[in-house]
Amino acid sequence: MLDRSRAVLLTWAGAFLALFALLALAATQSWGPVAGVDDRGNGAEEWAVDESWLREPLRWIEIAFGTIGINIILLVVVVLLLLRHHRRAAIYAAVVVISTQLVTTGIKHWLGRERPPWQNPSNLISSYSFPSGHASSITAVAGVLAVLVVMLVRRSSVRRTVYLVLGVVVVVVCLDRVLLGRHYPSDVVGGFLLATGIVLLGLALYSPLPRSHAEDAEPLPQALPSERRLAVVLNPIKVEDVEQFRATVAAMAAEAGWSQPTWHYTTIEDPGTGMAEAAAVAGADLVLVCGGDGTVREVCAELAGTGIPIGIVPAGTGNLLARNLDIPLYLRAAIDVALNGQDRAIDMVAVSGDGFEDTHFMVMAGMGFDAAIMEGVNEDIKKKIGWFAYVISALKSLMFPAVRVELSVDGGEFTKHRARTVVVGNVGFLQAGMPLLPDAAIDDGVLDVVILHPRNFFAWIPLAWRILLKRPHTDELVDRVVGSSVTIRCATDTPRQLDGDSIGPGKELHMECIHGRLLVRVPR
């Protein structure tokens, strides 16, 4: 829908608005079958008015989705969009819903159709009837939310579920207007047609998609081929339609003055290292990596120190590095940042330990409870419900046993602790914006360590409260240290994770921050 041309959207909008005009004429002039449907007969009339068990829930629906309720929903949606830096989408949502309400009110007064004489006597409504304000408002809200789902939600199963829920809500509200006798059937159908036309018209006139970084740049000469070489490392299971993704990247690259990209697909055997090496050897001036945190980590580790900037197109469940760099999660916006953003030198962390080869991480490492969460995630559930699978695993692992931990910072003496988890972070915010390490910065040359030791189930409550409020004081519940190198030793084999990927149990992790090792494209 968002990729349709303006002409197509205008055609569809015109079709819905033309149907609305025909229905308005037929309803107000009592033409043909429309009049027959509207004059429903005594049976339906008596059922709508006299069934007491139905009257109260219908009345609550009427109140919940009235003008005040709809405007509260709109306000919440707009605020959330602004907090997520989707300014154009927020403007689109507000303009479409408010315009629908104003146009509906204007047409009501212009046509002046009276309410049905059989409406429910409870809280009689004396304003005009055609079109239904409830029907048009809920359809406008549902249409806006459907557009936002297309724009922001990647999982097709989630999109289909949301569409189904929105459709059911629209049908329930429309039925409510007829069953209470507030409106004729043609009133609610008219409200639906009018709002759908306005949603499509708004989409044709004002795109909610983020504006490109390249729009204000000087146009590049078209006569000479571009020599800026672009390579893309793609985890193909992370995008629904690989061919469509390729076409999108190629079109946006050409618009931004890059060459046609070369493509490198990750495999189970090689999650990105070989592909990044091939891109570097071929002389790429920019490497886009599209995948989850694991794919991003592999590519970043291979290109560290080469001076080749990396554009991150987040397509995983956590996308923690992208979130901490303010890279948008909407694919087209992330591609735009990768092609037209600015380079930022960030730190990466070399890590070694027992039971695995030396490697790197970009976001965080952990031993204990947090690693047990990653280890316990059911991959089948994760594919269906995304990050909520981590919530389920966390509930199961909440009372992971405390272990004896020794900690050394910058080569100093080991200090002894009791902990349920130890997290070493290169960034400040984890999943769902949790500020576990609020003072951490990805380019400050140091690592931030947090040691958590809730003694019992109820101790998690004040711990979570302190983390959310970013309370600075430390004690046995929450302890923090900072250093450029960190070594953790556990008394027993303990689950471990790097950037959200389990690396198996072990007793030791040694981490060293490599300052400014990597160039990453970030928003201007």
Image (cartoon, grey):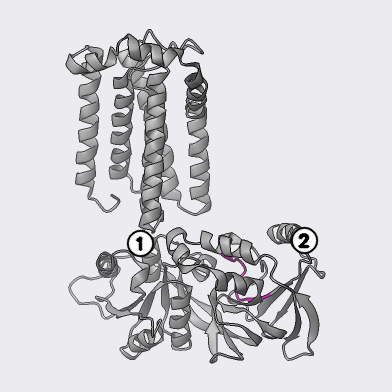
Q: Is residue 506 left or right of residue 517?
A: right
The amino acid on which the numbered mark 2 sits, given as a three-letter code, is Ala
Q: Give the residue displayed 59% in from the left and 66% down from the top.
A: 430
Residue position for label 2: 459
Q: Residues within 10 Å of mark 2 (few under 14, many from 20)?
A: few
Q: Is residue 8 above or below residue 27?
A: below
Above or below — where is 143 with respect to 342? Answer: above
Q: Quick one: label 2 or label 1, which is nearer the N terminus?
A: 1
Q: Quadrant of residue 429?
A: bottom right
Q: Position of residue 228 (x, y in %)?
A: 30, 79
Please give left or right for residue 19 compared with residue 313 in the image: left
Amino acid under label 1? Arg
Give x and y (percent) for residue 279. 34, 85
In the image, which residues are magenta? 422-431
| Residue hosting label 1 | 332
Where in the figure is residue 441, as x and y percent of width and height? 62, 72
